[in-house]
Each structure stands twice: as C-alpha cells, then as structure tokens.
Amino acid sequence: MIKFLDLQKINAVYQEQFQEKLKLVLDKGWFILGDEVKTFERNFANYCGTRHCIGVGNGMDALVLILKGYIELGKLQKGDEVLVPANTYIATILAIIQADLVPILVEPRLETYNLNPDLISSKITHKSKAILVVHLYGQLAEIEAINSLAEQHNLLVIEDAAQAHGAFKNQKSKIKNQKSSIAYSFYPGKNLGALGDAGAITTNDDALAKVIHSIRNYGSEKKYHNEYRGMNSRLDELQAAFLNVKLPYLDTDNNKRILIAKRYLSEIKNDKIILPNSNLSHVFHLFVIRTDNRDALQEYLLQNGIETMIHYPIPPHKQKAFSEWNNQSFPITEKIHKEVLSLPISPIMTIDEVDFVIATLNKY
Ligand SMILES: Cc1ncc(COP(=O)(O)O)c(C=O)c1O
C-alpha cells in the first residue's frame, strides 16, 4: 500500500536529533517561551525574509492573533467584513468569526483553486476592511493583483500560508516590501510539520508584531502586567526544538515534492484526469487532480494499493456549522469540492512508488 502520507517515515530520519533536543530541553528545565522558541522565531524570520516571527499554538490561532492584533491597533473593528476564498479549509473562516469579524466568501479560479482577484471587487462594501488570502495546496495566490486591489480600496491583506511554507522563495523580490502579515501552521502533515500543534506569524509590521507578541501570552509582556485582553497561544518549547531540527531541510523537502509533481505533470496522461496548474511558486503541499467521477477513481486507486485523500469533501458554506449559508450558491467552489482528489506526494516517496502511481492512473 502506498500511504497518502507516512508521518512515521518522514520523522524517522530526525529521530536522533529529536532525542538530543528533548534531552537539552529537559536538562534546562525551561518549558515555556524559552531559547528554542526564540531561536525558531529568529530562524523562521530569516528563512522568510521578514523582520518578525512570532511562534504561536497553531495555524488557526496565528490567523486569530493577526486579526485581534489589528483590532487592538484600531485597524479593524468588531463587525468589519473580511473577504476570504469560499474554498479554503474551514479554519480560515473560523478564525475570522473567532475574532468577531464577518467572513464574506469569494469564488476562486477553477484553474488555480485560489482567490480570483476579478471577483473580489463586486463583494467590496463600505464594511470591507481586509482580504484574507489563502495560498491553497501550496500555490501562491495572485498576491500582486490582490495587493493592488487592497491598496485601491484601503483594505488590509492577511495571508494564510498554512499550506505554503517556502512558496514565496522564487518570488521573494516581488512580495518583499508588502506590509502583509502571514499565518503558518506546523501541523504534523504540513511541509514543515511539528510533532504536535504549532504555528507562527511573520510580518514586517513592527507595531503589529509587538501587539501579537503580547496577546499570544495573555496580553502581557511583563509577568502579571496585562496590557491587552490576550489569549494563551504560545509556540510550545519542545515543538520549537523539533522545528529547529527540521527547518534546515525544508527547501530540500520542497524540492523533492516539486520533482515528484513535475513527473506527475508530464507523465500522467489520461483524458479523464485534469492535472493542477503549475507555477514557479508551487511547493505542492498537495497534488490535487480533478475528475468527473471522483469517488470511482478513488476506489480504483485504493483497490490498486494507492491511498488518496479529498481536500475537501464539503465546502464551508455547505457545512452544518454554517447553516445560514447552506442555501447560498458558489458553483466553482462546489465543483472543486465534488471533483478534487489528492494524490500521494511527500519527500520520502520512492521512485518506484511514483512510477506506480503514474502507471496506475494511466491505466484507468
Ligand atoms: C489553509 C489552512 N488554514 C489554516 C489551518 C489551520 O492550521 P492548524 O491546524 O495548525 O490550526 C490549516 C490547517 O490545516 C489550513 O490548511
């Protein structure tokens, strides 16, 4: 069986280094916001080319903290509207709601699965204050067009890069100067995955970084002195230690994913299968194909020993949790959710496994 994602194997190569880190942290006896968190924050900021990185509890909290940070700075207010792609993982939308803001769903482009800048304008009202862009599946959204639209309408831009660590690398110069704030998740299955929950925020905005630094820790910089009504969402010291082990390998791992994706893109030849769009910035967190009869293809692959997954089977506006949206129609989003299937892709896949996935799909 070719597993969709083998986390045991992915992490096995780091086992000795993880054990050394565990011993180091145990010997120090400092478990919250210690040296490992500070080191990771410095290293990840350097990796991303930003002035600040703040380690937090998980990717969803990273988004909540950015939004709450802007509220504390007076740049957002309770009830403001935030434009967000209709086809994202639900955490993006939940974060907006948790920050007492109002998500306004916008259709994506069918070709990229990412926000379509042309469809944003018609959704902008006097209450719109921000665009929350998602770089879904590891591919950068059309951030330059979105940034200029945001500038025209005086909107903040917030980025959800939970699936896109390192995706900006080939486009660095283009997004270097933006004032955006970016949320990352280090959920174990991500391109940079911890051994539990973890997340971070990167930004060049000094004021925002300062506020978030405080509100992730009860709104307090000085123990027992609380400047803001904060929350407890700190990057765990041990997770930071494990991430410090793995970060140096992120680019190599992303390149391995890209190589597998290139093979899939050039060697899968089947009229029943629509391959994903590929651009320079894609780090292929997921390799997502589309097909008319998705469930039949998934079953066929399983019968042949290939595990796949669906990202995602039910769009947010059709979830029970959002019953007020259930009657709304987002045809492109619905089509995507009906047709997508994610193939196995990871840095530890062997050449034989990739060959087998390609041959099996070509025989379908
Ligand atoms: C696009 C997107 N946003 C946000 C999140 C939330 O991250 P976490 O699971 O670390 O809270 C995820 C994680 O699955 C995600 O894929």
Image: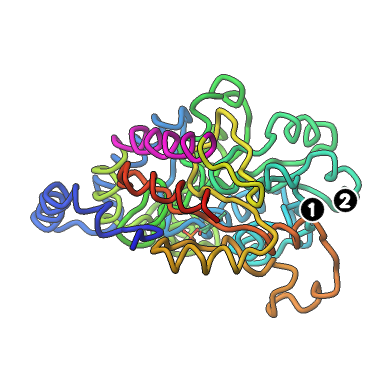
Find out if the beta carbon at label 2 lies less than 8 Å from the nearest ligand 1 atom: no
On the image, the x and y values in percent for residue 357 come to 43, 51
Residue 66 is left or right of residue 201, and the answer is right
Q: Is residue 68 above or below residue 134?
A: below
Residue 275 forms part of the magenta stretch? no
Q: Position of residue 218 (x, y in %)?
A: 46, 62
Q: How many other residues sit within 10 Å of disc 2, few (<14), some (14-19) or many (≥20)?
A: few
Q: Residue at x 9, y 54 (%)?
A: 23
Question: Which percent across, then down, holds residue 270?
Answer: 60, 46
The residue shown at (46%, 53%) is 360
Displayed quadrant of residue 94:
bottom right
Which corner quadrant holds the C terminus? Answer: bottom right
* Circle 1 Cα neighbour tier, 10 Å, few/some/many (<14 / 14–19 / ≥20): many
Using the image, determine if residue 93 lies above or below residue 156: below
Q: At 27% from the left edge and 55% from the top edge, which residue is drawn? A: 237
First to last magenta residue range: 248-266
Kindly report the distance in space between the C-alpha atoms of the residues bearing marks 2 and 1: 7 Å
Amino acid of disc 2: Lys
**Quarter assignment of residue 315:** bottom right
Q: What residue is shown at x 40% (from left), y 56% (from top)?
A: 189
- The residue that disc 2 covers is 123
306 sits left or right of 121 in the view: left
Would residue 306 be found to the left or right of residue 316 on screen?
A: left
Give SS at disc 1: strand
Specify the amino acid type for callout 1.
Val
Please tell me which residue lies in front, 231 or 89.
89
Task: State the residue position of label 1.
Answer: 106
Label 2 vs 1, first from the N-terminus: 1
Quarter placement of the N terminus? bottom left
- The front one of 328 and 97 is 328
Counting from the top left corner in percent of width and height, residue 57 is at 42, 59
Q: How many marks?
A: 2
